[in-house]
Structures are given as structure tokens and as C-alpha cells.
Amino acid sequence: MANNSIFDKETQLLEESAQVLEDDNLDRDALRAEYETLFKGYRRLVKQTQRLIKMSDRQQLELLELNELKNKFVGMAAHDLRSPCSIINGYSELMKSSASMDDAERDEFIGIINEVSGNMIKMLGDLLDVSAIESGRLVLEPAKGDLGDLIEQRVTFLSMLSEKKDISLTCQKADGLPQISFDSDRMCQVIDNLITNAIKFSESGTAILVTADADDEGIRFQVADQGPGIPPEDLDKMFGTFQKLSNRPTGGEKSSGLGLAIVKKIITAHKGTINVESEVGKGSAFIVTIPGA
């Protein structure tokens, strides 16, 4: 609106100068002054027009990028949800049509349906989080708390997943960690994503170590695994939205490819940082720092 107002003002000044020039009684000096006014107004109008064109080009580019993101979002949702929907439909049809199914087989089918539907819910949650983040609707509710205790709690909770794959999951937390301000629910997402990622890509018999230490007035925590490591060509894509990397989960687990993008956005919203150190064949370490103020 402000740009349009300036544009209209310049146009009005040019019209007024043009009307003055129509006066046949102007002397040479007055005529020269009006021509100079007209020329300066014209130059200002040209510059303003150029600024408006550049602004329009930027807005058009942003709209194209948003449209491309929307298409990727819809395409990925359709692709990743088709398979679990087919599985649920197939097993439920078998249960419906088989009158002779015994209790053990029925329980097995129900377990599969429950697991697949849980994966779908997680995937939908990731998609909704990405949508909120990309549209600028990520709102934090920070409060003072013990991030070290939260990390320890999540390690204990997720040890059930690591035990299923015979992976050792341990936590080493330094004493006397400072209380810092953070959004507990969102930080749970960060910790859970990093640990479950480590479990997904680690082989049985390996170990995952989670550490938490003081960092100036904040907290530095790390999730280190003994997995396959990350190829150099994938390191630059680690935290991108809708990125599929070359490594695959070792136990057939599903991955939306959105977890690390969400992690990065949440940490950035906390004014923190995340880095990854990795070597192929020697595992990976994700290092997060959250400031104290």
C-alpha cells in the first residue's frame, strides 16, 4: 500500500508539472525550472517502477517456491501413506473374510495393523509439523527446566526400542547442569528423533551413547552411534526437507525423511545449533547446543 501511495504521488506531481508547461505565458527561466521538475519526477517514477517490478519478481519467486513445496508435500503424503493404507486394508479384509481364523492369527494381524497405523500417525504428525514450520506457525512455549533430566528420561523410555534390536543405549549426564529455558514438548521431539534415528540405522550388537554436558551457560548434548556412518555427499542434505538419503534402516523401520528437518527447525527456534560428525563405517555423532539465555 505504501509503494502504491508513493507511485500515485509521483504521477500526480508529473501531471501538475505538465499542466504548468501548457501555460504559454511562462518565461524562459520558469520554463526551464518546470522542465527540471518534470525530468526529476520522471526519474523518480522510473526508479519507483523498477523497485516495484523487483518486488513483484521476488514475490512471484516465493510463490513458486511455496507451490513447489506444496506439491512435494502432497506427493510425499500420497506416496508414503498409500503403502500402509494398503496393508491395513489387506489385513482387515483377511480378518473379515476368514471365519476359521484362530485367536493367535487374529492377534498377529491386529498387531500388524496396530504397528502400521502407529507409523501412519507418526508420519502424519511429521507432515503437519513441517507444514507448520514452513508456514511460520511454529510457536514455542519455553519454561525453565532441567534439560539433562529430560534427556535421561527419554533415553530410559526409548531403551525398549533399542533392546528389541539388541542395541545398547546408555546416557552419561554431567552433574550440576544449569537450568535453562526450553519448550519441553518440542525438545522431546528433538531427543526422540535423534535417538530413534540412531536405533534405526544401527546394527544389532552395537552401542548408542547419549551425553549431556554444560556449555557456557547452556547445555550441549550428543547422540553418538556405531552405525554405518553418513556418506560425504549426504552430509549437506542431512537437514533438508523431503530429503531421502542413501542409508536405509537396518531393521526395516519406516522413515519419512522429515525428522531431521524438524529437529533443525526446532533447535534453530531455540537459538541453538546442531552439527553432525560422521565417517563411513565408523558411526555418526549429532551434537546439539542450547543456550542458557
Image: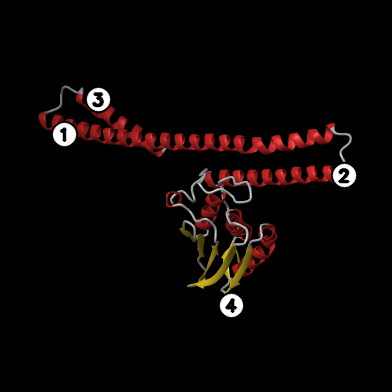
Residue kind at label 3, given as amino acid type: Gln
First-in-chain label (1 vs 2): 1
First-in-chain label (2 vs 3): 3
Q: Which residue is painted at 21% across and 22% down in the image?
A: 22
Residue kind at label 2, given as amino acid type: Asp
Q: Nearer the viewer, mark 1 or mark 2?
A: 2
Disc number placed over residue 158 in the picture, else none: none
89 or 205, which lies in front?
205
285 or 28, which lies in front?
285
Q: Which residue is mark 2?
A: 103
Residue kind at label 4, given as amino acid type: Asp
Q: Nearer the viewer, mark 4 or mark 1?
A: 4
Residue kind at label 1, given as amino acid type: Ala
Q: Please tell me how many numbered marks the rendered image carries.
A: 4
Q: Mark 4 and 1 residues: CB-CB less than 8 Å, in contact?
A: no
**Residue 53 place in picture, x, y as percent:** 34, 33
Q: Which residue is mark 4?
A: 175
| Distance from the alpha carbon under mark 1 to that under mark 2 | 99 Å
Q: Mark 2 and 4 residues: CB-CB less than 8 Å, in contact?
A: no
Quarter of the image containing the N terminus?
A: top left
Disc number placed over residue 19 in the picture, else none: 3
Q: Quadrant of residue 38?
A: top left
Q: Which residue is painted at 15% across and 24% down in the image?
A: 25
Q: Which residue is mark 1?
A: 33
| Distance from the alpha carbon under mark 2 to that under mark 4 | 51 Å
Q: Residue furthest bottom?
A: 176
Q: Secondary structure at mark 3?
A: helix
Label 2 neighbour load within 10 Å: few <14, some 14-19, many 20+: few
First-in-chain label (4 vs 1): 1
